[in-house]
Amino acid sequence: MIQKKKKEKKVQRQLAKITHLITSNTPTKRPSSYSKPWWTPELTQLRRIPHHTSSLMRKNQTSPTLAHVARNTYFKAIQSAKRVHWWQFLANVGSRSVWDAGKIAAGRAPDGFPTLENAASPTEINNTLLQHFFPPRPSPPPPLILPAFKDVHPVLPAEVSSALRKSSNTSAPGPSGIPYSIWKQVHKANERLLPSLFTPLLTHGYHPLAMKKANGIVLDNPGKPDYRTPASFRIIVLLETVSKILERLSALCPASAARSPGLLHPNQCGSLAGLCSFNAVPTLTHKVRLLQAASFKVSTLFLDVKGGFDNVCANKLATILTRGGVSAYLVAWIKSFLSKRQCRLMFQGAPKVFCPVAVGTPEGSPISPLVFVLYIASLHPTIPHGLAISYVDDLTIPVGSDSVRSNIRALQYYFGSIQRQGADLGVAFSLPKTELLHWRTPKDRSDVSFAPIVINDMLFPPSQVVRWLGYWLTPTLHSSVHFLRRLALAKASFTTIRQLSAAGKGLSSWATES
């Protein structure tokens, strides 16, 4: 047994020492001397001429016209140097950098500053955004005493190395500013350091407060008519990289336990290796064809979980994981990981203070997608002539019967059942994203059914095209619509490449063909 306060102080001291050693011995990144790669020695000489003529003009020793000509000549030389360097850059671009060149050519629109109604100062804007994205909710009190679990497998250096290999050096760091590349060098220099830090935390099922802090980057949602409401923005949460290493290690046990019966539903896809959207869409279309082969009329309701990761309740998740046979130390660690988190919003003029936030499971965490699919595994009813299929937070309910009307009644029944189970978990569905599709065979000569479905006093007519997991689905399961949409995207990409490939200059032929 150990007191939580003592454990927290000990971990804070350890992290503070490690952070101090890293920051004091790692050189900070300085602005490159090649920040203007298009600059030439000729420009250095030309820059002196307008400065000299301007000085002479102020002394009435030359005419303003001559100073104006010298300044224009200098600016035109800069534009010419930039243009020549850009074409030289494109000529040397490799096949992997073609799309980076396209992004550079397109430019980046400036982020909109949060100008919210009834929020004048940056502090008021900060509080309004926190209230919108992280509404207060009750959270379980943290334990005062941390028991030592006996079935804990110590973290091995090889496991840390494997987790670091899966971590990208380009991922943005958290509040400490330490990227994965630094932790890789630290682990290479001392492979016992990170395992000695992580093993006691898992042994006591505790995630320290120092690892629960995150930066929230406020970005504007493109295409909004105005930016006076919090809904016009989104927040990208950047977690501490050292915490994400521990989270990636902790995700290994639930991932292996999820393969056993009872924890993950057989029709759930996503968040696990080998279960991607390529598995979910063919499963749906195969089930539709099987029901049609049995002379059934088939209809499908497409649902989207509202809020997704934000609705995970730590206590209910702990109950689900315990019933599924997950180790007790990992259940305790996940409860600690989900509670008492802090976030610091980052925008122009932000106060940049850490505030307590109530979240389900933070997006961007390696363990969050897996935890979420285990949390909603019970939202998959058994359907006699149908199948409930989901991919993370996207759920579909295909049903078959003798008529479309019977399908609608069945879909209303199953939606009500799922909605009640979701309410017990604190999960709701986004009605604006709900869609209905009545399937038909290409040889079906009966009248097309436009029968709608009523859900929560809202009318949803059937759609003719539904985009689900990147696939465009039609009532006849014809692939032409999907491939036409994909062809349009490919043509847009080729247009971008053609714009970067002018005659005699630009991208090389081998870069565009590979």
Image: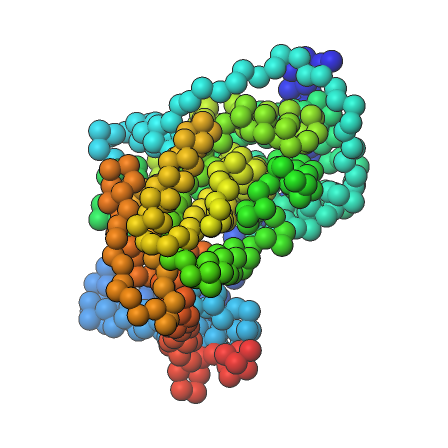
Q: Which residue is nearer to you in this view: 284 or 184?
A: 284
Asked whether residue 365 is in view, the answer is: no
Find residue 490 and report its image quarter. bottom left
Image position, residue 465 (x, y; %): 33, 61
Find residue 437 and report its image quarter. bottom left
Image position, residue 8 (x, y; %): 64, 20
Asked whether residue 273 is in view, the answer is: yes
Q: Which residue is nearer to you in this view: 332 or 215?
A: 332
Image position, residue 193 (x, y; %): 76, 35
Q: Residue at x 37, y 45 (%)?
A: 411
Image position, residue 194 (x, y; %): 73, 36
* Outermost bottom residue: 504
Q: Residue at x 26, y 64 (%)?
A: 447
Q: Which residue is nearer to you in this view: 184 or 444?
A: 444
Q: Residue at x 44, y 33 (%)?
A: 422
Side (left or right) of 17 relative to 337: right
Q: Residue at x 47, y 50 (%)?
A: 386
Residue 289 to residue 139: above or below: below
